Amino acid sequence: MGKFKLLSKGQRFAFLSTLVPELLLPEALVVARRIDPRLKRDFLKDLPLELSLHCLSFVEDARTLARASQVSQYWYALLQDETTWKHMCTRTRFFPLVSPFPSHSSHSRTSRRFDNPFVSRVPHSNLRLQMGRVSLNPLAQNFITTPRFARLAELGSVRPMSPPTTPRSFKQQFKDAYLTESNWLTGGQLIASHKHTDDGVVTSLAIDDTFIVVGMANSQIEVYDSRTGAWLNSLKGHEAGVWALIDLCGAAMGYGSDKHLVVSGGCDRNVRVWDANTGQCLHVLRGHSSTVRCLKVIDGKPLAITGSRDWTLRVWDIERGRCVHILQGHQQSVRCVEVAGNIAATGSYDFTCRLWNVETGQCLRVLVGHYHQIYAIAFDGERVVTGSLDSTVRVWDAATGTCMALLQGHTSLVGQLQLTSDTLVTGGSDGRVIIFDLTTLTCLHRLCAHDNSVTCLQFDDRYIISGGNDGRVKLWDMRTGAFIRELTRRCDAVWRVNFRDDRCVILLQRGGRTVLEVLSFRAGEKGGERITT
């Protein structure tokens, strides 16, 4: 051995090249067993910590990271790095709400449109790798912001998640979001189901973080707990069917009231203001001479606007309980209303859409173009979208009143519209759901969704949920238009569907009775039964 060490590099190679072919098989096996461990190198362990984490940042599949953490204790420790999982959240659009570290920013929540605070980052040189974990050196308590993780770009439409009661690591937040997404695709829990004693048609549904409020054609208004699905109380007072209902706290930004208000209207021609916590009717607003068919509230103001079959709209002060304005101009029943700021857009059976200043009562624009009744409307402050019995959808410029586009594709009544950013989704009596891009005014996807009328739909940046008179509730991929699955067992008819914060409320008719189902797709949801379709 001593002589071998004295050989030059070339002589060593020559000696080994001569020796190896002369080895017998048992001898070669012994040599191989001794050489193999010397050839194995942990490239992540040999690299500086910063480069090791940089290499891991290129892994885009969370399952690959999870498998990598099982390679060795060192790899497991590396994969506890918070920024790796924060980037994974951003890459997969599971953006975490709460940082597990102290932050100098006053922002603690995100919304669907937000400006992210600077991301606090612990320098890698201040990380101390320990067995099975990554911990912070006491000297690293003063966090800094590095150029690499400077201000994140605005993500646009991002799925918000409920903030946890205690800070969790970004890895845990990603895990919860990943499991929640998997539940949307394959699982979920039925956490509550309520069967009514009759087959009353559900006409309206409002949801916020506290209540589920359901209006029915048999004059009932039922209130449920949005967290557990438990029935709370009934709002009694309407003498006929409730056809319009809004939850002030869930649908509009509050104006400072200490009460949780619900506003409703119906066939008895009255508008009622309720305290949802107590069930007390605070005001009965009279003035309409026919059924109140549509209703909206104004953000940040104690104002509600109602449209009626008496051809008029009325603006109400729901705090004082009085009528502020009577909006006249339509020549037939007012079927739908939508608001943005202090402007209201209304659609009527007289084939026209009108824009109103809610605070002054002035009619600003009359939009003429449809040749049949208008049943649905969407309004974002700049564009008005109307759906009509003439089977077309029109996009209007709110500032000028000109028709920007005539969107075709349906073959009958377009009764469902939702407009978010530059995406428009429509549903019709022909059973179709169509996705339009309003930047290019083109059709992205045309879905043959149901065998009968589309009765309800809702979408976000991930999914579309549609319900139809064929008794099916279907989940679709928003980006590809692909059908994913049905969310509940087939029924007689679907009245309403609404999802919020990874919970979905479905109102349907099954076995001749009206049923409310509350589904949860949140990771770790306890109780209830697994969804089977």
Image (spheres, rainbow, N blue to C red):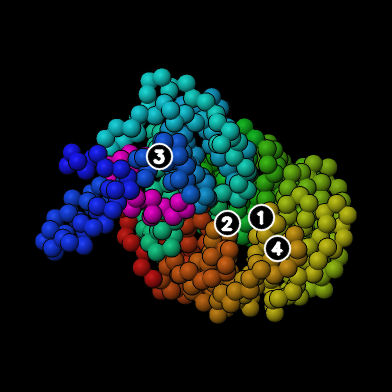
- The residue singled out by tag 1 in the image is 420
Magenta range:
59-80
Pointer 1: residues within 10 angstroms few (<14), some, or many (20+)? Answer: some
Type of amino acid at the residue the image marks with label 2: Asp
Circles 4 and 3: CB atoms closer than 8 Å: no
Give me the C-alpha separation between circle 3 and circle 1: 47 Å
- Of 285 and 500, nearer the camera is 500
Circles 1 and 2: CB atoms closer than 8 Å: yes
- The residue singled out by tag 3 in the image is 47
Query: Could you say where residue 294 lies in the image, as x and y percent from the top left?
Result: 68, 57
* Residue 287 appears anywhere in the view: no
Quadrant housing the N terminus: top left
* Quadrant hosting residue 141: top left
- Of 192 and 148, nearer the camera is 148
Type of amino acid at the residue the image marks with label 3: Leu
Pointer 2: residues within 10 angstroms few (<14), some, or many (20+)? Answer: some
Label located before the other in sequence (3 or 1): 3
Residue drawn at 66 percent across, 55 percent down: 420
